[in-house]
Image: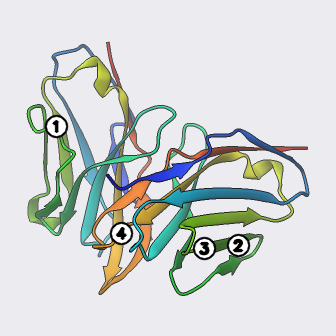
Amino acid sequence: QKEVEQNSGPLSVPEGAIASLNCTYSDRGSQSFFWYRQYSGKSPELIMFIYSNGDKEDGRFTAQLNKASQYVSLLIRDSQPSDSATYLCAVRDTGGFKTIFGAGTRLFVKA
Amino acid sequence: EAGVAQSPRYKIIEKRQSVAFWCNPISGHATLYWYQQILGQGPKLLIQFQNNGVVDDSQLPKDRFSAERLKGVDSTLKIQPAKLEDSAVYLCASSLVRGIGHYGYTFGSGTRLTVV
């Protein structure tokens, strides 16, 4: 059973700090990795995706991949209260047909 | 571009009743997914369509759930009869896939189902 594991949190950081979110995955052959943000009562929204060929930065968000250790991280710089949400990690399996979601990490950014 | 449309937004039914959800994906997105998200959990794939063919329905409880995607566009997910444990948010998503490239999902607003 392929799995994606995340710490459920909550992770609490002060406004302006760096929030670091991690997930581990079991399928060693996975090559596509996604981070979704889900506000309470809303549907998930894609914020970042990376392939196995490298990290990616987009504004305040950076996604990093460590293939050897099979984990993906999301860094949020200059965290804002509006970043408070659940962050879902998703991994595309080796065959490339199925995406498996983690249970999400709840992030609170304190003003 | 218009997003993924879903209806209804909310539904409350009694156990053993039937219910149907509708989804219209983003134009041009050949792949359509139905996910079930139980409170506090990540989305779980129920069924995946590529155009109007089923790619993966391994986690669909086929004794009570059914789905179709006619003409490769709109899709309907049905539950009959519903059980209490079916209470969840049902999310429809579509994606653009080019070759081996996958660009993530766009989710609809979801249907919150409560079975009483």
Asked which quadrant contains residue A108, the reply is top right
Badge number at residue A62 = 2
Chain assignment, label 1: B
- Mark 1, other Cα within 10 Å: few <14 / some 14–19 / many ≥20: few
At a point 44% along the width and 69% down the height, the residue shown is B104
* Residue identified by numbered label 1: B61
- Left or right of residue B116, residue A23 in this image: right
Gap in angstroms between the C-alphas marked 3 and 2: 13 Å
Q: Nearer the viewer, residue B97 or A17?
A: A17
Gap in angstroms between the C-alphas marked 1 and 3: 35 Å
Gap in angstroms between the C-alphas marked 1 and 4: 23 Å
Task: Say which amino acid is labelled 3.
Answer: Asn
**Foreground: disc 4 or disc 3:** 3
Residue B69 visible in this rendered orientation of the protein: yes
Gap in angstroms between the C-alphas marked 4 and 2: 23 Å
Q: Nearer the viewer, residue B40 or B18?
A: B40
At a point 91% along the width and 44% down the height, the residue shown is A111
Give the percent coordinates (x, y) of residue B81: 13, 23
Question: In what element is the residue under mark 1?
Answer: loop
Q: Is residue B65 above or below residue A56?
A: above
* Residue identified by numbered label 3: A66
Lower sequence index among marks 1 and 4: 1
- Left or right of residue B95, residue B21 in this image: left
* Residue identified by numbered label 4: B95
Gap in angstroms between the C-alphas marked 2 and 1: 38 Å
Give the percent coordinates (x, y) of residue A90: 47, 60
Please tell me if label 3 and label 2 are on a single chain. Answer: yes
Task: Say which amino acid is labelled 4.
Answer: Ser
Question: In what element is the residue under mark 2?
Answer: strand
